[in-house]
Amino acid sequence: MMMNRLLFSAFLLTLFVSVSCTKNKKLGKDVIDENSYLNGITTDTFQLETYTIAEDSVVTSKPSNVVLGSYVDPKFGRVEASFYSQVRLASLNPNFGTESIKIDSFVLALKYAGYYGDLSEQTFGVYELNEKMYIDSSYYSFSEVATKSTNLIPAGKRTHVPKPTTNVVINGDTLLPQLRLHLDTNFARNIITEATNGSATFLSIDAFQEFFKGIFVRVENPNQSSGQGAIFYFDINNSASKLTVYFTQGGTQKTFDMVINSNCAEFSHVDIDNAGTPIAAILQDSTKGSKEFYAQAFKHRAIVRIKHIDQLPKNIVIHRADLTLPVQFQNGNRFKPGTGVSAATKLKFSDSKFTSLGVLGEFDDNKKHFSINLRTYVQALVKDQVVNYGVVVSPRYFINSSERIIFNGKETTNKNKPKLVLTYTTY
């Protein structure tokens, strides 16, 4: 993947220098409005082939945020997200003294980083890992780590209505929005007992993580209906995300923290069940993408292939190549298309990975479409410097969100269709 990126970066630089020299020498376009090129030819008659592919090996370890929750989408089916993470001591060899300790509460706090869907109630579970994780290992959206069977959240405290936009007040302090899951205080008692019994468990991080291997956080929402639910985003490397034991000792209230930070192995696990949905039909028959096609975080990418691009003459300079992708979305719909998409391709058909095109598509909320500047990519296609695999369009935050997008195909019954507008001159 790194080699692909280096090759593509080198190709971009070469192409940029070549085009710049041609423009300076032949066209003098540096001082002319790019929308007013002399003798430029503008065309929008290209046929676009559109469809959706599924990706089955998405690496989700060390994300900028993890995802948690579930929702049922009428077009995309059921999505359920959970995460695994190690836990570290805030400081080694904690001293709990010799006085008796009363455990008041044991809380897993997770700082919100956003959400996707609605704010109906969800039921959560937290489980202790029974298998060690490793920070230098790659984990995928389908990866699993063995856990113990007991839900650490006591019955009666598992269901919450998440409030990702509401600050919380803890002991008189106002904190940014966070989900607070109250865990079994007996588990906290076991941790403190281990720390006070003279063992070496708390003398090193490795020893502690052998004793407490980490946590698995999931949801348990079997009865959600279509259109209900949400996926929540959590910044678990934020200092506010941690496990805290609240206890009283000698009449004084105290706390003991276990943290989750960038030195912890962590990853998101996502299950997407598209059975019987329109997206499943496209995966079976790509021609159905002519009506509408899809992209979905963690699994599905949209493909837009420019047909007959090889029929353009080779002695041209591409000045503009604007791809417009209209979407099906009404304001107020809880499943929004997001604010941006990424664009990638394959340099060779044999490539196993995608190479970024170095451009993003922005969503126009008024016109309800994404627009992507493909000038450099189309120039490379014309010069046969890349194969015509197609533009791979994905939600910008592919492993950090739960966004999904419904694009109009070329044969859509809706008014707006996908379109490539090309402006070029010959030399």
Image (cartoon, rainbow, N blue to C red):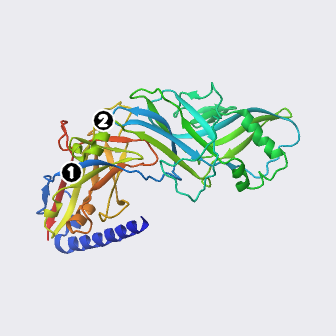
The correct choice, above or below, for 263 with respect to 187 in the image is below
Callout 2 touching callout 1 (CB < 8 Å):
no
Identified at 16% across, 69% down, the residue is 314
Residue 50 on image: x %, y %: 24, 48
Where is residue 245? Give x, y as percent. 72, 38
Of the residues tagged 2 and 1, which is closer to the observer? 1
Q: Which kind of residue does numbered mark 2 sit on?
A: Phe
Q: Quadrant of residue 17?
A: bottom left
**Residue at figure coordinates x 24%, y 74% from the top left:** 21
Q: Nearer the viewer, residue 6 or 211?
A: 211
Numbered tag placed on residue 387 in the rendering: none
Tag 1 residue: 49
Q: Residue at x 76, y 39 (%)?
A: 190
Question: Image height check: is 131 above or below 148?
Answer: below
Identify the image quadrant of the C terminus: bottom left
Q: State the mark number for residue 329.
A: 2
- Residue 349, position as x, y percentages in the image: 29, 63
Task: From this view, report whether residue 11 is shown above or below residue 402.
Answer: below
Mark yes or no: residue 119 visible: yes
Element type where label 1 sits in the image: strand
Q: Earlier in the sequence, mark 2 or mark 1?
A: 1
